[in-house]
Image: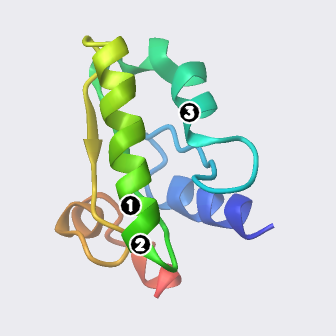
Amino acid sequence: MLLEQMRSLLHQAAPRCRVEACFVGVGEPSLEKKLEELKDAFGAGGAVAPYLLFPGFFLGKIEKTLGDFQFRNPAAKIFLAGPLGSDDFLFEAFPEGFEKFQ
């Protein structure tokens, strides 16, 4: 499954980070469920790095989902990176393994 392969590659590139994978549109686990599942782990903060073929609609849905989650959980500090491949944060976070995604 592509989602698990992506999760595994990200984890290999940043082994000190917890890397989870989920879906925004159709599929399980959903972003909403994953955020709720992991909310206790966000004490130190977290990041959502979208991997999208069509970022327009889905990126807006991710932004809304994160906004709603942070409204309900104000202590959670979550950073939304740009879609994979276009955000400098990701190049810094995954310097050795990032080439595998391009």
Q: Position of residue 41 (x, y in %)?
A: 45, 18
Placement of 58 over or under 72, stated as above or below: below
- Percent x, y of residue 52: 49, 71
Q: Which residue is mark 2?
A: 55
Hey, what amino acid is under mark 1? Answer: Leu
Residues at marks 3 and 2, CA–CA distance in whole angstroms: 18 Å
From this viewpoint, which residue is outermost toward the left? 88
The residue indicated by pointer 1 is 59
- Amino acid type assigned to the residue bearing label 2 in the image: Pro
Choose the circle earlier in sequence order: 3 or 2: 3
Residue 32: give its label.
3
Identify which residue is drawn at 47% across, 18% down.
Answer: 39
Residue 64 lies in what quarter of the image? Answer: top left
Residue sitting at x 55%, y 58%? 12
Q: Classify mark 2: helix, strand or loop.
A: helix
Residue occupying the point 29% across, 27% down: 45
Measured in 3D between alpha carbons, the distance from the residue under mark 1 to the one under mark 2, in whole angstroms, is: 5 Å
Instruction: Say if mark 1 contacts mark 2, CB within 8 Å.
Output: yes
Residue 87 higher or lower than 27, as above or below = below
- Does 29 sit left or right of 16 as displayed? right
Spatial CA span between label 3 and label 1: 14 Å
Q: Residue furthest bottom?
A: 102
The amino acid beneath tag 3 is Glu
The answer to which of 18 and 67 lies nearer the viewer is 67
Q: Secondary structure at mark 3?
A: helix
